Image (cartoon, helix red, strand yellow):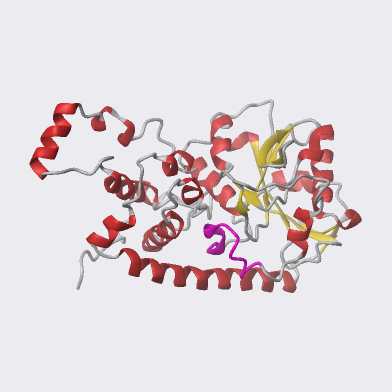
Amino acid sequence: MKGTLKVEAKSPEATIRGLFARWLKEGKLSAILSPAYSAAGTATLALFSNPQKLDEAAPLLPAMGVNAASIVAEFARDASPNAKVGLFLRPCELRAVVELIKLKQVAPDSLVLIGADCAGTYKAAGFRNVRGKDADFDNKHVREQSGYAENVNFRVACQMCEYPKPLVFDLNVGFIGMDADTELWVEAATDKGKGLVEGLELSAQDEPDKRKKALEGLSAARKATTAKRIEELDKAMMGPEKLVEYFSDCLNCHNCMKVCPVCYCRECFFDSDTFQRDIGEHVRVSLRKGATRMPSETLLFHLTRMNHMMASCVQCGICEDSCPVTIGLATLFKKVSQNAQKEFEYVSGRSLDEPLPLATFRESEFTKVGEE
């Protein structure tokens, strides 16, 4: 079930909020998780259950401070027979939810995956949009589409994101390649999605060619940006000495790990007693080496994280946004995860049915080891 939905009063955001209100009032959803503005105008997330509160919802908010999959993992570990929660999320967030479902960290039965196109976001830190000063900001972002690929103010990961449309969804609401003042693209892929679409006045049709070309063009431009960034990265960090230098500013704060949506261990090895050395042991290590950098084991931490995350990493870049010393983690994880997933013929979050690479043995994999 797919087609175009008429936009009311040239406001795609208000139109989507109207959908939210309808679904809540009709009991099709118990609550909806959506980007929102706080009272201070900051970019945040909110779980809405009262249609009267939806003025605070900002479904097409172009600012991102956390990958919402982390929030979903907090409240949706177990299903509830009395709840049906809609997740109105960006493509990278839905991909992370898919990975968490496959990792048995999120129960899907009480969730409805409602995707939204995302052409790029700004860092939430410092982002302010006090309605009344620029009440149409989100709509202008959706309306003025020509500069998406060239916008260097987008978050670094967004500048390299080749998935402006969700890969897995029950229902998707799209604006890229559409005249967002007049219509939105709506596409239901499952029975859950079709249940939300029932009763809407959709103009049934196939996905417009203009939209397909816009999505393909944006994806191609982002792939080109990725190739350029990775080429620059290789020059900056290839080789042991450059690798050490690349991570030399690390404070060992573990922020990158704490905000990663698919890093789900209850206790990290690096936070365990294994690395809680007493003063005597620190002195012995220092005597053996002559001098030891403090804080210690920062490079080992990052190499281990890359090894753990590469198969499920959705390249959302929240790790880099959270780094207090701005280490270039987004490009690095893009490179590592992209290469690893290519070897397994896998794309993180592409399918709920596609098995996790490291949990599946296939005799045809890695028949050649080493360099020729």
* Residue 123, percent from left and from top: 59, 51
Residue 167 highlighted magenta (yes or no): no
Q: Is residue 175 left or right of residue 217?
A: right
* Residue 56, percent from left and from top: 77, 39
Of residues 26 and 275, the one drawn nearer to the viewer in this rendering: 275
- Tell me if residue 120 comes above or below residue 249 in the rendering: below
- Quadrant (top left/top right/bottom left/bottom right) for the C terminus: bottom left
The quadrant holding residue 38 is top right
Number of marks in the image? Answer: 0
Of residues 251 and 16, the one drawn nearer to the viewer in this rendering: 251
Q: Magenta region, mostly helix, strand or loop?
A: loop
Give me the residue at 40% from left, 52% from top.
311
Residue 152 highlighted magenta (yes or no): yes
* Residue 209, percent from left and from top: 73, 73
Residue 23 in sight from this viewpoint: no
Magenta part of the chain: 148-161
Residue 70 in sight from this viewpoint: yes
Q: Residue furthest front?
A: 291
Give me the residue at 68% from left, 57% from top.
117
* Residue 371, percent from left and from top: 20, 69
- Quadrant (top left/top right/bottom left/bottom right) for the N terminus: bottom right
